[in-house]
Image (tube, helix red, strand yellow):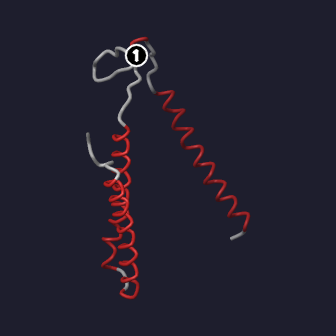
Amino acid sequence: MNVVENYVSVAVFILVGLALPAVALTVGRWLRPHKPSEAKAIAYESGVDPTGDSWVQFNVRYYLFALLFVIFDVETVFLYPWAVAYDALRADIGIFILVEMLVFVFFLLIGLLYAWKKKVLEWT
């Protein structure tokens, strides 16, 4: 393949990647109903009319707890493909991959112990 053909194919992918969202958003704007009103502009929270100030402070522990959940949930997603494919791996690299995954889990446990020691996991 010619070098110019490579650049043309990349340019086509970029143009299609930019055109698809633009076309989808434009067609969506044409097709959706648009009837603004004052009632639709009011904040809606579980059927209750909003009263008072919208600024509410939450304890930072809720955010830390949620962040830890997301981190460990994503790490579990990284462990699943390894566990499924481990049986199918060649024997000569199997031990290396097992040790590598044990190091990975060890660092996860260090992070969990650190969060436990800092009392981030206490829900109060």
Query: Could you say whether the residue bearing mark 1 is in a helix, strand or loop?
Result: loop
Residue 96 in the image: x percent, y percent? 40, 82
- Lateral position of residue 26 relative to residue 7, left or right: left
Give the class, few, some or many, for how many residues have Cα within 10 Å of label 1's Cα (few <14, many ≥20). few
Count every numbered label the image shows and give the total: 1
> What residue appears at the point 39 percent right and 66 percent down from the top-left corner?
107
Q: Nearer the viewer, residue 83 or 13?
A: 83
Q: Single out the residue that lies furthest toward the top.
A: 38
In the visual, does 52 lie left or right of 3? left
Residue that extends furthest to the bottom in the rendered view of this protein: 92
Residue at x-position 35% and y-position 73% = 102
Where does residue 119 sit, x and y in percent of width and height? 31, 49
- Residue 16 image offset from top left, x and y in percent: 59, 49
Q: Position of residue 113 (x, y in %)?
A: 33, 59
Quadrant into which the N terminus falls? bottom right
Q: Is residue 6 above or below residue 58?
A: below
Give the amino acid type for the residue marked by disc 1 in the picture. Answer: Ile
Residue annotated with mark 1? 42
The quadrant where residue 100 appears: bottom left
